[in-house]
Image: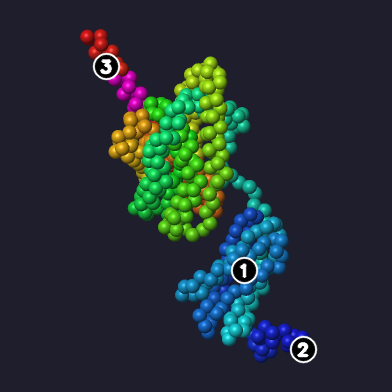
Amino acid sequence: MIIEFLVLQILGISSGEVRKPFARFLSLDKTKVLLYTKTEEALIVRSSYKSNGPNSSYLSVYLEDLEVAQVVNVTKMSSEVMNFKISLLTKREGETSLIIQLWDSVGGQDRLVEEIKDIQIKVIFKPKTETLLQAPLHFDSSALMLILPMILLNKCAFGCKIEVETLQIAWKKPLPILLGGAIQFFVMPFCGFVFTRILALSQALSFGFVMTCTCPGGGGGYLFALLLEGDITLAIVMTCASTLLALIMMPLNSFIYSRMLGLHGSLHIPVSKIVTTLFFIVIPISVGIIIKRKVPKWASYLEKIIKPFSFVLMSIGIYLSFRMGLMFARTINLEVFSLGLLIPALGLLFGYSFSKMFMLPLPVCKTVAIEGGALNSFLALAIIQLSFPQHKAELASVAPFTVAMCSGCEMLFMILLYKVKKITALNEDEKLNSFV
C-alpha cells in the first residue's frame, strides 16, 4: 500500500482521484482495427475533454506487442471537437492490444483523465495483387532481352554520327543548351502549375503534371532530331546536360511546387535512376564515337541501321505508353487529356520561338524545340511512386503517362507531316525540272 501510494504521488494522482470512476471523454471510430502487412493505418480518437489551459491535454498510446505493429505518430487536430490521429504501422502478422491514455498537464503535474484498454489490433497477411500500375509492366522476358540490345545498339549507332569537332563547338557555344535548360526547368514547371490551378485538378494529379513538366529531355530527343533533320550532336549534348542538371533542379522544383500545392510530405528524388539514365545515354554513345575514330568501316554499317531501328523503337515506345496509359483510361477526363496534349506542344512552341528570337540556325531551332517537348516522363513517374502511398501514386501517375502518350503521338504526327511535305516539295521540283 505504501509503495502504491508513493507511485501515485509521483504521478501527481491523489487517492481520491483513483477511487473516482473515470468520466468518458474519449470516443473512437472503431475499437477493433484490422491491418494488412506493409501498410499504414490511421485511428481517429475524438476528445470532449475541456482542459484548464490551452493545449494542456495530450494522448499517450502504447502497444503491448511491438513486434506486431508500432505507433508512428500521434497528431492533435484542433476543430470544434478535439481530435487525435494515431498512425499505426504494421510489422508482421499477429494480434495485440492498444492502450490509450488521456492526460492533462496542470501546474507542472500530469493527471490521468481517462484510459482505454480494450482496443484490439489484428494484423493479417494481404495476398499480393497487381496494382493498376504494375499490371502493364509485366513483359515477356525474351521480348525484353530483344529490345534492350536494340536500344543500346541504336544509341551506339548515334554515337557514330557524332563528329568530335562538332561536339566541341556545341560546348563552346552553349546558348541552345542554356535555352533548353531554362525551358525545361523554369518555364515548363511554372506553366504546368498555372494550368493545373486553372483546371482545379487534385493535389496529387497537379503534382504529377508539374513533375512531368520539370523533367529533362527524353532519350528519344535525338531520334526525333534525326528524323526531323535537326542537329543530332546538339540533341545528344542537350539531353546529357539536362539529365545532369535534373539532379539539382528536380529536387528544387519538387520542394517549391509541392508546398505551393499544399503538399508538405516527404518527397523522394530518384537520384540513382537519374544517374542510371545519364549513363545509359552517355556510355553507348561514347562507344559509338570511339568506333567511328578507330574502326570507320564498322561505323558506316552502324549508321545505316539508325533509321530502321529508330522507327521500330519509336513504335514500341508509343505502343508501351498506350498500353500503360490505357490502364488509367477511367481516370482520364477531358481536362487531363487536354493538358496532356498541351504540355508537349508548349515545350515545342517555347523551344522553337526562343531559338528564333536569338536567330539560331533552323536545325538548332528544331533541336531546342524537340528537347523542350520530348520529356523523360518516366523520371516523374519514379518520383511519384517513391513519394506517395499507392492510391495517390496511381492517381498522380496518370499525368506522366498521359503526357508520354500525347507527346509520342504529336511527335509522330510532326514526322509524318514533315515527310509528306518533303516528298511533295521534291515532286514539285521534279515537275519543274521536267517542264524546263
**Amino acid found under the numbered disc labelled 3:** Glu
| Residue occupying the point 51% across, 58% down | 265
Instruction: Give the residues in magenta.
Output: 413-425
Count residues near mark 1 (Cα–Cα under 10 Å), then give few for <14, some for 14-19, many for 20+: some
| Residue occupying the point 29% across, 20% down | 425
| Residue occupying the point 62% across, 32% down | 141
Tell me if I can see residue 349 in this picture: no
**Amino acid found under the numbered disc labelled 1:** Thr
**Quadrant in which the C terminus appears:** top left
Which residue is under mark 3?
Answer: 428
Please report whichever mark, 1 or 2, sits nearer to the chain's N-terminal start. Answer: 2
The answer to whether 251 appears left or right of 129 in the picture is left
| Residue occupying the point 31% across, 17% down | 426
The answer to whether 265 appears left or right of 353 in the picture is right
What secondary structure is found at the residue carrying circle 2? helix
**Amino acid found under the numbered disc labelled 2:** Ile
Which residue is under mark 1?
Answer: 31
Q: What x and y, as percent, mark residue 167?
A: 45, 30
Distance between mark 3 and mark 1 Cα atoms: 81 Å
Please report whichever mark, 3 or 1, sits nearer to the chain's N-terminal start. Answer: 1
What secondary structure is found at the residue carrying circle 3? helix
Query: Marks 2 and 3: which is nearer the front?
Result: 3
Which residue is under mark 2?
Answer: 2
Q: What x and y, as percent, mark residue 352?
A: 33, 36
Distance between mark 1 and mark 2 Cα atoms: 36 Å
Tell me if I can see residue 246 in this picture: yes
